Image (spheres, helix red, strand yellow):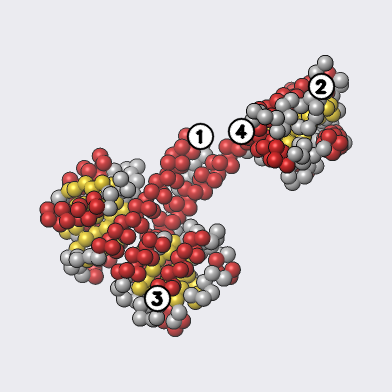
Amino acid sequence: MQGKILIVDPIATHRIMLKVKLASAFYCVLQAGTMAEAQDIAETRAPDLILCAMHLPDGSAAALCKALSDRPRSRPIAMLALSTGVDRPTRMAALAAGVHDVLARPFDDTLLLSRVRSLIRAHNTEADWRIRDDAAGPLGFAEPEVPFGAQGAFVLVGRNKAVMQRWAIQMRPLLGAGVMLANVTDVMSERIVARAPDIFVLTIDTDTPHPEENLRLISALRANAHTQHSGILVLQTRPDPALAATALDLGADDLMTEGFDADELALRLKALLRRKRVTDHLRQTIRTGLKAATRDPLTGLYNRRYAMPHLAQVAEQARGTGRPFAVMVCDLDHFKQINDLFGHASGDAALVQVAERLRGALRPTDMVARIGGEEFMIVMPATTAAEARQAALRLCDQIGCRPFDLPGSATPVRITISIGMTISSAPHSLPNVGEPGVTPQETGNRLMDQADKALYTAKVKGRNQVEMSRPAA
């Protein structure tokens, strides 16, 4: 099934007719005749969308929308209100309550299904982000909700500059924000898209030749990296159900079919901005969580969770290029003494400064990670043995040449580092990159093991030195 839709209407024939249309489009259809029944079904069956008659025996579409949104810990449910005829105040009250749109009977079937597809698509997108956000929360990656503010960045797009200027003058006080004007021909210019506006209002003048050409902008905005998440509201100067349906299927988020109305447009833009900020916040939370999952919180370096798959990826790339790469395991010498003598705050400060020096002495293509308490791992792609050894000696020098200023110590503290390293192309580096039947993960793990053994040798030989892995006797 494409989605779960709840029809709420006291008239059985209306429910049956809608069910036939929706079921033929492969939707799962639920039915209710009253507001109370609808609330029970919404609680137990969690529909993706509600189609609700404007007036119910025990309430209204606006009242149902508000009741559902007031539920504790509830997820929002999109709603379309259906009415045989409705006056402007009732329509505006429904939109203000959170109803997405009010459709007048008899409605165009194609437009209705396009509107349903659009809302369920938006619901599924938000639900996907919420699933990831729910997973991030217990791990400590979730961020507090950002309170909604009405201000946003809006762009009004059309061909008649004088008309758009009049509209913008009416909209600015209602939105509490500026409204930029753009012509259809320059809306994709760097001047506009680089600002990543929150919402584009795309005006479709159905009285001009080939108005459908303006709809190409929807696809262009969705394909652009700066504007792919911007909201798009299509405003038709007069109704055209076919164009409206096409706009929604191309990716428009909302639609006004009856021409410009400043108050209604402001209501729709604020609602669309609110929904956009929710998904923006969810996306940012996931990005933050992903970054936190792969970074060491103290030093900002990558952690083992990132480093090992990265090593396997470098091994896979080397398999294709045939170029060797280096793996180093580094360990600070006598680091426990720093903690014992000066305290853990000094130890943390030392690790942060060491990380900065390591990062500064490596190429942008090299990867450095903190994989243990005072242990670091370095992967250098496309590197010969001579180049890797020279880099390792440089790292030893960078750490040992200048003492570290640490809290808890009156004088700078000298710290040294030992490094064990291996090269993927060394004859004893079994398995070699490209060996049949050996995965990149196995190659990385064995090279890591060889570098670790070389580190042990460097420690035994007196520390503060570099040791290359040697063939087993």
Q: Taking 41 as reference, is 255 left or right?
A: right
Three-letter code for the amino acid on which mark 3 is drawn: Pro
**Could you say which quadrant of the image residue 199 lies in?**
bottom left
**Helix, strand or loop at disc 1?**
helix
Three-letter code for the amino acid on which mark 2 is drawn: Pro
Is the C-beta separation of discs 4 and 2 under 8 Å?
no
First in sequence, mark 4 or 2: give its number. Answer: 4
| Residue positioned 56% across, 41% down in the render | 290
Three-letter code for the amino acid on which mark 1 is drawn: Leu
**Helix, strand or loop at disc 2?**
loop
Please name which of the two marks, 2 or 1, marks the residue nearer to the observer. Answer: 2
Mark drawn on residue 471: 2
| Residue positioned 31% across, 53% down in the render | 78
Tag 4 residue: 305
- Image quadrant holding the N terminus, namely top left
At label 1, counting other C-alpha atoms closer than 10 Å, the crowd grade (few under 14, some 14-19, many 20 or more) is few
Q: Nearer the viewer, residue 381 or 258?
A: 381
Please name which of the two marks, 1 or 4, marks the residue nearer to the observer. Answer: 4
